[in-house]
Amino acid sequence: MNVIFDMTLIGSGFAVPASKTGVTRVEEELLLALADHRDIELSCSANSDLAACAAYLETLGHPTIRLCHAKWQRDISHFLEFRESIRTLRRDEKKNRSLPARATRWIHQKAAQLVRPLTSRISPDALAKCEVFHSVWNPIPDQIRRTPGIQRFYTVHDLIAIKHPEYFDSNHAGASRDLIASIHRDDWAICISEATKRDLLEFQPMDPDRIFVIPWGVSERFFQCKTPEDDARIRNKYGIPKAPYLLCLATFEPRKNLASVVDAFAKVAFTQEMQHHHLVLAGGAGWKMESIHKAFAIHPEIRDRIIVTGFVGDRDLPALYSNAELFLFLSLYEGFGLPVLEAMKCGVPVVSSNTSSLPEVAGEAAILHAPTDINAVGESILAICSNEELRRSMAAKSLEQAARFTWEKTADMTANAYQHALIPNTRRNE
């Protein structure tokens, strides 16, 4: 199968490393897994940051992955569409005396396209051979939609900004609505969990048979890393005392529910079994961080036992996970919940939320609670940290659960979805 993969997000992350997200990391893993798949001939496109995409692929040095763009050129098609749409909106404004919010967002998006110095134009040769186009973040390009015979796939990570707009700013929610609305009835969707598929069907009517549930894998860069040297390096770098610690890895924002993590730790921090434990909160700053600061203020007695590391790079994560006594993840809602799998791959016991996709990811290897049930979470922390046999048992279950999620398996399932889409309708319905 000839597949064009949209690597825009990877290029953006390569151009501005500080903007690199968890989704960027999994897109890189999927790109490599698909490129190595026996049934797929893969090339890449992007709708921005083309120079960064080319530089990334050169640095990667993969023997077969390439960009499939023609000579970069200015394109006036967006301008012509934009001009005609403005005329239409002006006519509507005379009738309604107002512009709807969605139309305003559309204007801003088109204006952003107009100021891009170079357009993303896939070469005619690549377009002629293309059987499948797969976007994991951006809407399907107009150039692909205008080309008949291409099966169009879109990966849906989550609909949290639509389902729970209170967890995001209005711009994020609006962009998510526009992305989901861009999925047509004759497109194919890949959801990373059953929970995300349910949410997609709730907010975007489409044939369930055109939606595949394909979980992410967990990278081989995560492994048990408990050597004294790595432990000492991590502790020195992030200011973690030589004492047992609980770990939570999440962006500092309301949806990640870090305040409940602090509250649960405070519940048990001065018990005989936990009096020497620390809590490590790792992750970048998000928005609306008032709740975590309030939790710190409510529990001043444990503030000196809470270490806030800030962003932690990929190189340090295996050792940070592996040397934790317990991983806590009390997020209110997740499209997948990759940190749970990463911790399990490092052989760490996990206490997680029982919401959204997290039971799918954690399986029976973790202890699951309602994310705001502080008493129950505290009891589980105490039970695990005071019982070495239980920790060993849960660590073994973590490794077994993580082994079920590989990028090779994700690539196989994705290739099968492509094959299914390429079967003529008459044969597919037999």
Image (spheres, grey):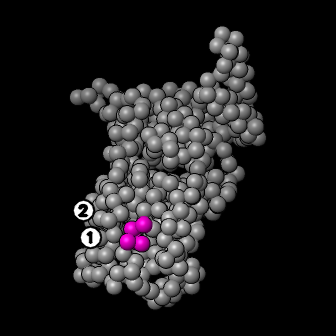
Q: Residue at x 59, y 61 (%)?
A: 285
Are the residues flagged by discs 1 and 2 in contact, CB closer than 8 Å?
A: yes
Instruction: Give residue 333's position: percent from left, percent from top.
Output: 41, 51
Looking at the picture, which amino acid does disc 1 mark? Lys
Q: Residue at x 68, y 23 (%)?
A: 81
Q: Which residue is mark 1?
A: 397
Looking at the picture, which amino acid does disc 2 mark? Glu
The quarter holding residue 273 reads bottom left
Residue sticking out furthest to the top: 95
Marked residue nearer the N-terminal end (1 or 2): 2
From the viewer's side, name the closer residue of 344 and 26.
344
Instruction: Give residue 3's position: percent from left, percent from top.
Output: 48, 43
In magenta segment, residue 356 = no
**Magenta-colored segment: predominant secondary structure:** helix
> What element does badge 1 sit on?
helix
Instruction: Give residue 249's position: percent from left, percent from top.
Output: 47, 66
Q: Is residue 392 visible?
A: no
> What element does badge 2 sit on?
loop
Mark 1 Cα-neighbour bin, 10 Å: few <14, some 14–19, many ≥20: many
Q: Which residue is mark 2?
A: 364
Magenta segment: 263-267
